[in-house]
Image (tube, rainbow, N blue to C red):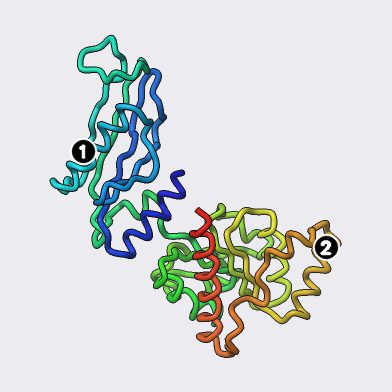
C-alpha cells in the first residue's frame, strides 16, 4: 500500500495538486495499524491508504480536512485507544497511536520526495559516451542516477556532478557489491565491451528490478544469452531483458540513443504505474 501511495503522490505533485499525508509514527499496546501506516487525502476528501479504520480513521480524516485549511506543515496527534482511559476513542483496542499529519505543497514537496522514494533509481553500468548523454536526461524525468564503471576516469563526481552516486569497481564481476536494487530499480547496461555487458547481466538477473536493458546488436546479445543459458539462466529470465535497448527510432548518436532509452524507460514506468 505504501508503494501505491508513493506513485499516487508523485502523480499529484506532477499535476501541481496539494495533498495531506497522515502517517502512524508510534504505537503502544494493541493498535489497529503499526508504525508506518499511511493515509493520503486529496483536497476533495478522496483518500488512499489507511491508518487503521474505525474512529481512529474518522478522527484522522477530520484532522486532514482541517489541515487543508491551516496548511500546517507537520503536527503529531496522540490518540488514546484504551477505553479504560480518559478521553479514549471507543475502539476497544487497548493501546495508543500517534499520527503525524502534514500538508504537502506540490510546488515545494520538501523532504517528502526523499522519504517516500518518489524518484526511482537508474543504475547505469558503464560511464562512457552513451551514459554521459543519458544521465542528465534521466534526471530530467525524475530518476536518481548511479554510475558504475571499472575505470575511475569514467565514474567520478567531476564527470557526473549531479548523479546521486558514482562508483568505480575493480571489474564488473563486482558491479553490484556497493548497491542494492529493488522492484523499483532501473538497470541500464552500456559498458564498453561484451565482457562487461555479460558480467553485469549475469549478476543483474539474480536481483529484483523494474527494468533491465542492455545495449548491443541482436547477434551479440544472443551470444551472451547462450552463455547464460549454459549457466542455468532460463528463457523466462532472458525475456525480461530489453535488448537491444531503447525504442526503435533509428538512433545513431549517443544523444539519440539516450533519448530512445529514456523513451523506453518512461513507457515501462507508465505501464507499472497503471498496474498499481
Residue 119, picture quadrant: bottom left
C-alpha separation, residue under disc 1 versus residue under disc 2? 55 Å
Residue 58 rendering spot, x and y as whole percentages: 28, 32
Mark 2, residue position? 229
Q: Position of residue 155 (x, y in %)?
A: 51, 70
Q: Residue at x 44, y 63 (%)?
A: 144
Q: Quick one: SS at disc 1?
A: strand
The reply, left or right, for residue 162 in relation to residue 82 is: right
Decide if residue 70 is on the left or right side of residue 148: left
Within 10 angstroms of label 2, few (less than 14), some, or many (20 or more) residues? Answer: some
Of residues 175 and 26, which is closer to you in this image? 26
Question: How many residues crowd mark 1 within 10 Å: few (<14), some (14–19), many (20+)?
Answer: few
Residue appearing at x 62%, y 61% in the figure:
175
Q: Quadrant of residue 257?
A: bottom right
The mark total stands at 2
Viewer-nearest residue: 29 or 84: 84
Residue 131, given in percent of the width and then of the height, sits at 53, 76
**Which residue bears the numbered disc 1?**
75
Relative to 70, 194 lies left or right: right
Amino acid at each position: 500500500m505504501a508503494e501505491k501511495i508513493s506513485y499516487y503522490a508523485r502523480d499529484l505533485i506532477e499535476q501541481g495538486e496539494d495533498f495531506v499525508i497522515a502517517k502512524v509514527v508510534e504505537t503502544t499496546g494493541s493498535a489497529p495499524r503499526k508504525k508506518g501506516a499511511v493515509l493520503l487525502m486529496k483536497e476533495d476528501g478522496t483518500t488512499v491508504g489507511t491508518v487503521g479504520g474505525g474512529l481512529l480513521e474518522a478522527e484522522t480524516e477530520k484532522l486532514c480536512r482541517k489541515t487543508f485549511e491551516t496548511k500546517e506543515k507537520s503536527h503529531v496527534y496522540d490518540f488514546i485507544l484504551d477505553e479504560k482511559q480518559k478521553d479514549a476513542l471507543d475502539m476497544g483496542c487497548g493501546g495508543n497511536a500517534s499520527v503525524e499529519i502534514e500538508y504537502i505543497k506540490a510546488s515545494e514537496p520538501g523532504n517528502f520526495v526523499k522519504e517516500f522514494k518518489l524518484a526511482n533509481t537508474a543504475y547505469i553500468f558503464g560511464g562512457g559516451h552513451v551514459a554521459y548523454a543519458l544521465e542528465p536526461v534521466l534526471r530530467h524525468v525524475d530518476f536518481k542516477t548511479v554510475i558504475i564503471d571499472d575505470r575511475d576516469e569514467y565514474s567520478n563526481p567531476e564527470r557526473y556532478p549531479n548523479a546521486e552516486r558514482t562508483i568505480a569497481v575493480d571489474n564488473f564481476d563486482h558491479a553490484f557489491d556497493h548497491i542494492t536494487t529493488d522492484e523499483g530499480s532501473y538497470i541500464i547496461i552500456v559498458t564498453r565491451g561484451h565482457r562487461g555487458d555479460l558480467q553485469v547481466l549475469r549478476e543483474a538477473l539474480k536481483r529484483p528490478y523494474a527494468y533491465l536493458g542492455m545495449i548491443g546488436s541482436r547477434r551479440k546479445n544472443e551470444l551472451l544469452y547462450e552463455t547464460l543459458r549454459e549457466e542455468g539462466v532460463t528463457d523466462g529470465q532472458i525475456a525480461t531483458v530489453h535488448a537491444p535497448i531503447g525504442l526503435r527510432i533509428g538512433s545513431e548518436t549517443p544523444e539519440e540513443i539516450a533519448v530512445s532509452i529514456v523513451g523506453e524507460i518512461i513507457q515501462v514506468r507508465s505501464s507499472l504505474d497503471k498496474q498499481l
